[in-house]
């Protein structure tokens, strides 16, 4: 009997479940339309928002085609060019796309960046994804926090970045000398980039901990430094979705190897912090006779919380090391191919004579500054970035057929941007936008440094 009736009972149950689901969805939809939906419509009409152009997806639901394209681009080291080509293909400076089922916006409009990073920054956060991947590695420091926590970090770090604290050019001079020594003199071709990365790591660790890892002089430095550097680089690549083991997939997982590498980084930094704690008194006495400041010692005056100390110092290490090394590499790449620019720079530098320049003298080197700006324009060292909307808000431009109307962005949605593509826009920088031309353009800030960046001055030094 039971067997005879089971198909009927089964289909009846399925049918009932289907009806209940439809009814539940309809109720939820009506409720949503009367509450959030109504508030969205009000926002859209109040601000005159129009939809942004949509990127065409072969997989409009999950956007897997887009992910696959980006994966291949990353593999072939063409991610930035692929993003730029994506904007050209869509034919818009702001567009809507789908990634893993989520609607996002991508833009190369300076107005939109200004709004997200500065004018409307209270409505935007770094985003949950960034925090999820960076916090296990770096801890909760300035690069991973928003709101009150970010304010606390900033206040804690600020005294370390006033000019007199960072104007210790002798520190840089020592490491520049090590760098020059490390360049082979046999006249053969040399790859300077790894040396620049070693140089900035050496200088940054001395600035942060008072003790350099001295990777340019491996026989003199801390014996654990090499392992730390390998682990730091591994974790950084993993956080950027470019791990050697898992590639882009790393962003979905915390592999046991990755956890082991975090541990190596943390143990090494903790040991430097412990040493700094032991030498606090000595530092204070020496400080009376010298103008040498050590970041971690200054931080210790504000907190002895080991996790906080580690997080803030690792954050500054990450923020300062690659940016500066990449900038140096890009500048020297161009200098090596452009003798005219090199000789003009040389003449300007020669005006300094043989003395170590002061911070103020460095700032007077106008050609050098223009050269750095041009490098940062054509090869921005933070080439792509993103933020997540913390509340319903809008991008000021990018909507409608002419792309001039505001675009509505729902709470939780992401906006992504590419400085690389924006800095190569011909309508902004002229027909020769993709050429390296020092001093030829001064109209637009070449690299978009956000309002919240307090360290610009250190980068200039
Ligand atoms: C060429 C040099 C540099 C460029 C172009 C640059 C660019 C940037 C950009 C675009 C951000 C915003 C990132 C984001 O929030 O998503 C940022 C943040 C930051 N950078 Fe740099 N940076 C440079 C050098 C440095 C150096 C040398 C240091 C430290 C020694 C540093 C420390 C920081 C810190 C602490 C933040 C977080 C600021 C905050 O949230 O308030 N940067 N940088």
Image (cartoon, helix red, strand yellow):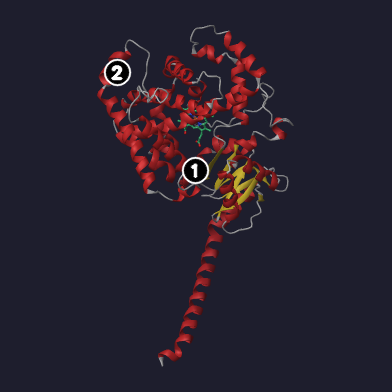
Q: Which numbered disc covers residue 283?
A: 2
- Asked whether, in this view, residue 298 is left or right of residue 116, the answer is left
Image quadrant in which you'd find residue 372: top right
In x, y percent, where is residue 260? 35, 43
Asked if the residue at label 1 sits under 8 Å from ligand 1, the reply is no
In x, y percent, where is residue 157? 40, 27
- Asked whether, in this view, residue 256 is left or right of residue 403, the answer is left
Q: Which numbered disc covers residue 163?
A: none
The quadrant in which the N terminus is found is: bottom left
Q: Is residue 160 above or below residue 252?
A: above
Please name the residue shown 59% across and 30% down the image.
Answer: 447
Q: Nearer the viewer, residue 69 or 409?
A: 69
Secondary structure category for the residue under label 1: loop
Q: CA distance from mark 1 to mark 2?
A: 40 Å
Q: Is residue 22 above or below residue 61?
A: below
Please name the residue shown 50% across and 47% down the image.
Answer: 248
| Mark 1, residue position | 242
Lower position in the chain sequence, tag 1 or tag 2:
1
In this rendering, the label closer to the viewer, 1 or 2: 1
């Amino acid at each position: 009997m039971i067997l005879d009736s089971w198909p009927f009972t089964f289909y009846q149950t399925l049918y009932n479940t289907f009806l209940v689901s439809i009814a539940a969805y309809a109720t939820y939809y009506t409720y949503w339309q009367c509450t959030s939906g109504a508030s969205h419509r009000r926002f859209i009409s109040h601000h005159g928002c129009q939809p942004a152009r949509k990127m065409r997806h072969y997989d409009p639901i999950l956007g897997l085609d887009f992910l696959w394209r980006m994966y291949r681009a990353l593999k072939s080291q063409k991610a930035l060019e692929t993003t730029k080509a994506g904007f050209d293909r869509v034919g818009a400076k702001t567009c809507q796309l789908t990634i893993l089922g989520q609607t996002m916006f991508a833009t190369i409009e300076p107005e939109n960046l200004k709004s997200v990073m500065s004018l409307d920054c209270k409505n935007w956060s770094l985003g949950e994804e960034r925090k999820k991947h960076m916090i296990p590695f770096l801890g909760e420091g300035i690069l991973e926090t928003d709101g009150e926590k970010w304010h606390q970090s900033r206040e804690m770090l600020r005294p370390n970045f006033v000019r007199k604290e960072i104007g210790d050019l002798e520190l840089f001079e020592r490491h520049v000398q090590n760098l020059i020594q490390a360049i082979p003199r046999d006249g053969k071709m040399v790859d300077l980039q790894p040396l620049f990365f070693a140089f900035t790591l050496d200088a940054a660790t001395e600035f942060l901990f008072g003790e350099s890892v001295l990777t340019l002089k491996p026989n003199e430095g801390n014996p654990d430094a090499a392992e730390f550097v390998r682990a730091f680089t591994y974790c950084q690549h993993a956080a950027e979705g470019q791990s050697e083991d898992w590639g882009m997939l790393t962003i979905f997982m915390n592999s046991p190897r990755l956890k082991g590498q975090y541990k190596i980084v943390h143990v090494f930094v903790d040991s430097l912090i412990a040493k700094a704690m032991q030498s606090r008194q000595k530092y204070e006495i020496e400080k009376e006779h010298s103008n040498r400041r050590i970041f971690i010692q200054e931080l210790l005056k504000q907190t002895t919380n080991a996790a906080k100390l580690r997080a803030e110092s690792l954050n500054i290490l990450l923020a300062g090391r690659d940016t500066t090394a990449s900038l140096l590499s890009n500048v020297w790449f161009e200098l090596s191919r452009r003798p005219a620019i090199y000789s003009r720079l040389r003449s300007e530098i020669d005006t300094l004579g043989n003395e170590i320049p002061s911070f103020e003298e460095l700032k007077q080197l106008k050609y050098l500054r223009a050269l750095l700006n041009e490098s940062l324009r054509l090869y921005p060292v933070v080439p792509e970035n993103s933020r997540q909307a913390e509340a319903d808000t809008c991008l000021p431009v990018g909507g409608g057929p002419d792309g001039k109307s505001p675009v509505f962005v729902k709470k939780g949605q992401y906006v992504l941007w590419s400085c690389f593509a924006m800095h190569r826009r011909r309508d902004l920088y002229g027909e020769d936008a993709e050429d390296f031309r020092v001093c030829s353009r001064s109209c637009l800030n070449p690299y978009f440094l956000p309002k919240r960046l307090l360290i610009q001055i250190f980068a200039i030094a």
